[in-house]
Image (cartoon, rainbow, N blue to C red):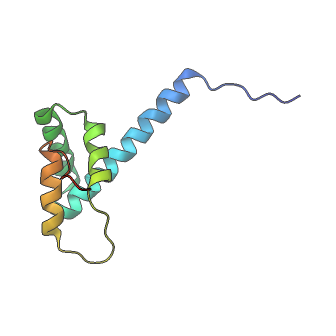
Amino acid sequence: MDVEQPRPPGDADRFAFEAGRAVIEQAKGMLMLVYGIGEQQAFELLRSCSQHTNVRLRELAGRILTELPTVGGQVPTAPLRVELNRILAGHPPPTGR
């Protein structure tokens, strides 16, 4: 009989860490694209806003991914910047969404 062995606790922690890191990397990419900044600047912006709003970095990055409109093709970056500014400032999404 082949019984699957449970994962050691370290694997679960590592998986959670990697998942959080992926969210942060995606949010950094969005900041880089919308603001036209480099990778280090994007991380510093995320970190600074996280500290200023007292929101965990991973949670702030998750908000960016879920609240920033997803678009395809070429779209003016101004509306995306407005949304990113709102999210990074810690403001909730507008009602009616």
Horizontal and vertical percent for residue 82? Answer: 12, 59
Residue at point 21%, 45% (across, down): 43
Residue at point 31%, 77% (across, down): 73
Identify whether 37 is placed above or below 52: below
Q: Does the rendering let one see residue 37? A: no
Q: Residue furthest right?
A: 1
Q: Is residue 51 left or right of residue 14?
A: left
The C terminus: image quadrant = bottom left
Q: Quadrant of residue 52?
A: top left
Q: How many marks?
A: 0
Identify whether 43 is placed above or below 50: below
Q: Residue furthest bottom?
A: 74
Q: Quadrant of residue 6?
A: top right
Residue at point 25%, 41% (across, down): 60
Q: Is residue 53 left or right of residue 72?
A: left
The N terminus: image quadrant = top right
Residue at point 26%, 50% (across, down): 64
Horizontal and vertical percent for residue 58? Answer: 30, 38
Horizontal and vertical percent for residue 51? Answer: 14, 33
Q: Is residue 46 left or right of residue 17?
A: left
Q: Does the rendering let one see residue 77? A: yes
Q: Nearer the viewer, residue 63 or 17?
A: 63
Identify whether 34 is placed above or below 51: below
Horizontal and vertical percent for residue 67? Answer: 27, 53
Q: Residue furthest front?
A: 96
Q: Nearer the viewer, residue 55 or 9?
A: 55
